[in-house]
Amino acid sequence: MGAGGGLTTARAACLGAVQGPTELLPVSSSAHLRIVPWLLGWDLDEVSPEDRKAFEVAVHGGAALALLIGQRRLIADELRRLDGRRVAVIALSFLPAVAVGLALEEQIDRHLGGPRSTAFGLIAGSGAMALTDRCPQERNAVEATPADGLAIGCAQAAALVPGVSRNGSTLAAARARGFRRAQANLLSRTVALPVITAAAVRKAVKLRRRGNVDPDLARAATVGVGAAFVSTLASQGLIRLIERDRSLLPYAAYRTGLAGLILWKTRDRG
């Protein structure tokens, strides 16, 4: 890779730093990983779509590792309370995303990875968040049933579309099922780690089978993962913004504004 283009270590560090806060807030970290390089005019043409996807998944893995450490007490509490019902909720929240990812991942990346489709994903997720945040707040996370798990699982599957946001879609699904805002956030975080970890492991296996990974890409990915790990740990306090029973509308407004900027830029560049 030349110094003037490609996924340099400086650019990887920048994207890793962006990953932390955007992973913890319902604003779509995947959209930011795709849109930030585009808005800044980075020349990434020499990086193949497969390598860019591998970098994105690796950065998500760095964030997941930070969440495992930062949320270790919550995870330990959840494990101590694990019973058949909770296992069913987690499994049903996990399986739809895995099934859709295995079946449609390549088609989604090929047809829905551009700026305009990402903008429409941001708008769609914003609409869902704004609508469901008006639902009654009646339930706690301990009341979650397998049907709730399936609804959240379908939301995680929908979040494979760039811009929709895993965090935002699962929050919207939980709010639509009547969970309080803070409890919806707890459910969203509980079901996130299995999906993020599975995606990272799957991509690592695919890269290992492919072999001959570009040393520059490997170096950039290592820097990006490290930056994502640090930025996610440093951003843990952002979780409390949602746990304080705050409305999802400010996040929906931010996403809509970002989508508007993207659509304006696409028209300008077109």
Image: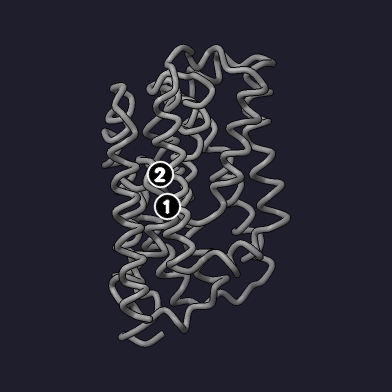
Which quadrant would residue 115 be assigned to in this image?
Answer: bottom left
Of the pair 230 and 190, the residue shown nearer to us: 190
Amino acid at circle 2 = Ser
Callout 1: SS: helix
The quadrant of the rendering that contains the C terminus is bottom left
Q: Percent from the top left, x then y, of residue 98?
A: 67, 46
Amino acid at circle 1 = Leu
Q: Is residue 221 left or right of residue 110?
A: left
Query: In the rendered structure, are the residues bearing label 2 and label 1 in contact, judged by CB atoms less than 8 Å apart?
Result: yes
Of the pair 269 and 48, the residue shown nearer to us: 269
Which quadrant would residue 85 be assigned to in this image?
Answer: top right
Which quadrant would residue 40 be assigned to in this image?
Answer: bottom left
Q: How many marks?
A: 2
Q: Percent from the top left, x then y, of residue 78?
A: 52, 19
Q: Is residue 195 left or right of residue 63?
A: right
Against 7, residue 241 (above or below) is above
Residue 122, which numbered label? 1
Q: CA distance from mark 2 to mark 1?
A: 6 Å
Q: Is residue 112 left or right of residue 83?
A: left
Against 158, residue 73 (above or below) is above
Q: Percent from the top left, x then y, of residue 155?
A: 57, 39
Q: Percent from the top left, x then y, of residue 212?
A: 60, 77
The quadrant of the rendering that contains the N terminus is bottom left
Residue visible at 29% across and 63% down in the picture? 261
Q: Which residue is mark 2?
A: 126
Residue visible at 67% across and 22% down in the picture? 146
Residue visible at 57% across and 41% down in the picture? 156
Residue 210, which numbered label? none
Mark 1 neighbour class, 10 Å CA radius: few under 14, some 14 to 19, many 20 or more: many
Against 231, residue 141 (above or below) is above
